[in-house]
Image: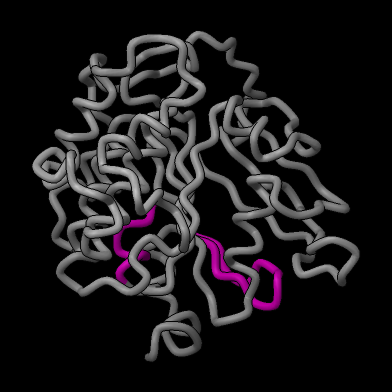
């Protein structure tokens, strides 16, 4: 993955794909929203988040994660570090008792996950992320549930990104391999024309070859201008493609830097990457 040709060549200039206003694959209604970004603030930020599930104890402690347009931001750390919890906090699936979540300069801390999807968040959970009894194409159509325009161009772009899905578009999604199911889940999220794409453990349970292929596709999505925020268990491989990376320990920021910086950090390598 370190030799990936996209590593230092992101920022697609093809405006039929890239959208400077929202990072969507095809300019659409999300692209028409007025930008409210504060100068110098990341496009997406979970800022100093403290919180947890329901009335339980706080799991996150002043945790900050962020992603810029066209950037891949990766969250790594040991089991139980709060990685998926941080992702869910950004998406509104748990209580943020202190801190804030802002998208394109707008405070969305108190919005429900459904409202955040309308605002432009695409979220792919680790499990139960497809409709197994529906065909591949029906799954993608479900992803366009908030759309009121013609989404056929977006579907064509998803099929270009994941050619195997076009080949199997009439097959039940539950009959696909694990890697193909993940492609369906990512494709369905892209059908909403998101401003930001959030992926929780996208390579969990897939083979190394399939993992490399999924990472290649994730890089392609980032090249269109969509920020990617990703939790990943395969830390070394994820850091190789990360523009920005966060190491969490017990719900707190332990290390922050570019993927290359953290790969070169002796303490990070020894503590989290096996030396």
Q: Residue at position x 15%, y 55% from top? A: 4
Q: Which residues are magenta?
A: 237-257
**Position in image of residue 231 (x %, y %):** 48, 62
Could you say which is closer to the camera, residue 128 or residue 274?
A: 128
Q: Residue at position x 35%, y 39% from top? A: 139
Q: Relative to 143, does residue 32 appear above or below in the rendering?
A: above
Q: Residue at position x 21%, y 28% from top? A: 157
Q: Relative to 45, does residue 194 appear above or below in the rendering?
A: above
Let me know if residue 149 is in the magenta part.
Answer: no
Q: Residue at position x 65%, y 70% from top? A: 82
**Position in image of residue 118 (x %, y %):** 59, 25
Q: Relative to 141, does residue 235 appear above or below in the rendering?
A: below
Q: Quadrant of residue 1?
A: bottom left
Could you say which is closer to the camera, residue 275 or residue 96?
A: 96
**Position in image of residue 67 (x %, y %):** 52, 43
Q: Residue furthest right?
A: 55
**Position in image of residue 64 (x %, y %):** 68, 54
Tally of numbered tags: 0
Question: In this figure, which colouring scheme has been used for the structure?
Answer: one colour
Quadrant in which the C terminus appears: bottom left
Q: Quadrant of residue 134?
A: top left
Relative side of 201 to 216, left or right:
right
Let me know if residue 248 is in the magenta part.
Answer: yes
């Amino acid at each position: 993955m370190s030799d990936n040709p996209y590593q230092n060549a992101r920022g697609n200039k093809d405006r039929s794909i890239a959208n400077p206003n929202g990072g969507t694959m095809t300019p659409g209604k999300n692209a028409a929203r007025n930008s409210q970004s504060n100068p110098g603030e990341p496009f997406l930020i979970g800022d100093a988040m403290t919180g947890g599930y329901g009335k339980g104890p706080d799991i996150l402690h002043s945790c900050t994660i962020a992603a810029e347009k066209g950037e891949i931001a990766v969250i790594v750390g040991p089991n139980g570090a709060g990685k998926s919890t941080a992702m869910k906090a950004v998406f509104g699936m748990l209580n943020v008792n202190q801190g804030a979540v802002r998208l394109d300069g707008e405070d969305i801390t108190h919005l429900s996950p459904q409202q955040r999807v309308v605002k432009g968040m695409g979220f792919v959970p680790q499990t139960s992320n497809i409709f197994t009894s529906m065909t591949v194409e029906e799954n993608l159509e479900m992803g366009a549930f908030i759309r009121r325009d013609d989404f056929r161009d977006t579907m064509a772009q998803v099929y270009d990104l994941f050619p195997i899905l076009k080949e199997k578009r009439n097959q039940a999604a539950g009959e696909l391999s694990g890697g193909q199911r993940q492609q369906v889940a990512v494709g369905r999220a892209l059908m909403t024309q998101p401003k930001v794409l959030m992926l929780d453990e996208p390579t969990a349970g897939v083979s190394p070859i399939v993992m490399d292929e999924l990472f290649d596709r994730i890089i392609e999505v980032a090249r269109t201008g969509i920020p990617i925020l990703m939790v990943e268990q395969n830390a070394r491989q994820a850091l190789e493609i990360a523009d920005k990376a966060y190491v969490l320990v017990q719900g707190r920021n332990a290390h922050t830097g570019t993927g290359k910086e953290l790969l070169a950090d002796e303490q990070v390598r020894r503590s989290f990457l096996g030396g």
